[in-house]
Image (cartoon, rainbow, N blue to C red):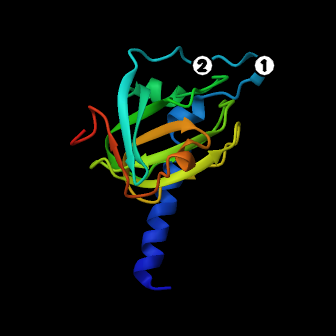
Amino acid sequence: MSRGTIGRRFLLAAAIALSASGAAHAQLPRQNPANCKGQPELKPLQPLTVTTPKGAFKFSVELADSPREREYGLMCRKALAADRGMLFAFARADYQAFWMRNTLIPLDIIYIGSDGRVVSVVRNAQPLNEAPLPSAAPAQFVLELAAGRAAQIGLLPGDRVQHRVIAGG
């Protein structure tokens, strides 16, 4: 392994550790799944399109663009329709790592660069799993969909996501 590779891996590990152990997450308590309290649906729902080699797929998404909205995300939700999701928007691209604390449904987590291209996909993230699920490259946006949807639409790194907050979207 080259010195540059070791350095890049160290930086990636440090970025993941910082994202996964951020102050906002550290203050978020675990909840009993039977009476979990999350945030209400973020309205209005907004159109988002994912384009893969299989075609263009339209979703209605909640936009989580404040620290509190991003912190709670889809926690405590009991279902997510196949045509729904949540788009997390950050001020700039960086390595991201999401977890499934207090998240009761399995999700696909799609990391998106500032240009709207998918940089990596975590498929079927398991409910209540607190292990960090990192992006493979810097991402400014993260899209959560119902588990299995990424495979159904053939979503892979390099595919395009369009939304009003994404450059070119």
Return the residue at label 1. 34
Residue 70 lies, in percent from the top left, at 46, 30
Residue at the spot of label 2: 38
User: Does 83 sit above or below residue 120?
Assistant: above
* Residue 36 sits in quarter: top right
What is the distance, in whole Å, between disc 2 and disc 1 at their CAs?
12 Å
Q: Amino acid at mark 1?
A: Ala
What residue is at 43 percent from the left and 26 percent from the top? 60
On the rendered image, what quadrant is the C terminus found in? top left
The residue sitting at the left extreme is 168
Residue 73 drawn at (x, y percent): 52, 28
Residue 65 lies, in percent from the top left, at 37, 28
Q: Residues within 10 Å of mark 2 (few under 14, many from 20)?
A: some
Residue 46, quarter of picture: top left
Residue at position x 52%, y 61% in the image: 13
Relative vertical location of residue 160 with respect to residue 136 in this rendering, above or below: above
At x 51%, y 52%, the residue is 121
Q: In this orientation, which residue lies closer to the viewer: 73 or 160?
A: 160
The reply to whether residue 32 is visible in this rendering is no
Residue 3 seen: yes
- Locate residue 161 relative to residue 111 in the image: left or right: left
Coordinates of residue 139 in the picture (x, y in percent) = 38, 50
Identity of the residue drawn at 43% across and 31% down: 59
- Secondary structure beneath dot 1 equals helix
Q: Is residue 11 above or below residue 106?
A: below
The disc labelled 2 sits on which kind of residue?
A: Gly
Label 2: element kind: loop
Q: Residues within 10 Å of mark 1 (few under 14, many from 20)?
A: few
| Left or right: residue 73 compared with residue 94 | right
Front residue of 105 and 17: 105
Closer-to-camera residue (4/166)? 166
